[in-house]
Amino acid sequence: MPNHRYLTDEELELLNEVCHQEGPQALLSLPLTLDAHIAPLLEQASALELKLNIDGIQLSFPVALKHPIASQEQAELSSPRIITNGGHPRAWRLPNPRSLQLRQPNGRPLAAEIRDLSTNGMRVLSRRSLFGRCRHRKVLLTLRQDQQLRLTLELVRQHKGPQFWLTAVRFELSMTDCRTLSDFVFRGFLEQMNKRQEP
């Protein structure tokens, strides 16, 4: 039986090998040597990906090159997308993320705790309902002290328990913000998995 509900043991082992680096960094990096004939082609490319296949499961890492003309290049990998045998992408989910805070548009803290976060939605615990008659709400999501994302939350469902409301929401992000959040979620995911594997 797999050690994690989102990944098989093989996927987790591969991700730990590919993505292990010392110190907190926003992006993964690796040295990349380019053939002189390939470099001009990359200048015209709109996107570049590194793909790994494991028994029908594909990991797709978006790649950013700092200086595509050079033959010796440092490439940056952002968080991978997992595509399973059926061709469906699997969303990264970060349970109980730390150091995150939801704020109202005016910057005041929102009395709500994020229980589960992905790149297009989250589950939130609060003492009061976050939604009245309207099904949308604007918030600020603080990832780090200098990083905030503006989100428009759309209500998916909410449930009132004895003391708390559990609310599921979804949102859409620009490509830049989606990459920022994806890297944050993926890094946090790996950190949690590594802590579970420590003796």
Image (spheres, rainbow, N blue to C red):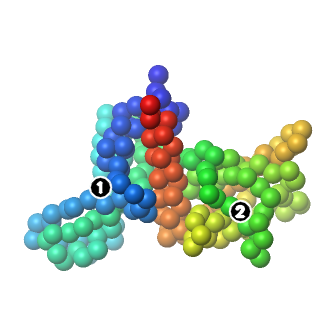
Judge whether 128 appears above or below 144 on screen: above
Q: Quadrant of residue 84?
A: top left
Q: Quadrant of residue 142?
A: bottom right
Alpha-carbon distance for marks 1 and 2? 34 Å
Q: Can residue 131 be spotted in the picture? A: yes
Residue 126, horizontal then vertical, whole percent: 81, 51
**The residue positioned farthest toward the front in the image shown:** 199
Point out the tag, 1 or 2, that comes first from the N-terminus: 1
Q: Residue at x 17, y 75 (%)?
A: 70
Q: Secondary structure at mark 2?
A: strand
Residue type pointed to by label 2: Leu
Residue 55, horizontal then vertical, whole percent: 31, 33
Q: Secondary structure at mark 1?
A: strand
Q: Residue at x 71, y 62 (%)?
A: 102
Residue 6, horizontal then vertical, whole percent: 51, 37
User: Foreground: 54 or 185?
Assistant: 185
Q: Quadrant of residue 33?
A: bottom left
Residue that badge 2 annotates: 102
Residue type pointed to by label 1: Leu
Q: Residue at x 47, y 59 (%)?
A: 183
Residue that badge 1 annotates: 50
Q: Residues within 10 Å of mark 1 (few under 14, many from 20)?
A: few
Residue 169, horizontal then vertical, whole percent: 71, 54
Instruction: Name the side, left or right, on which 138 lies relative to 26.
Output: right
**The residue positioned farthest toward the top in the image shown:** 1
Q: Residues within 10 Å of mark 2 (few under 14, many from 20)?
A: many
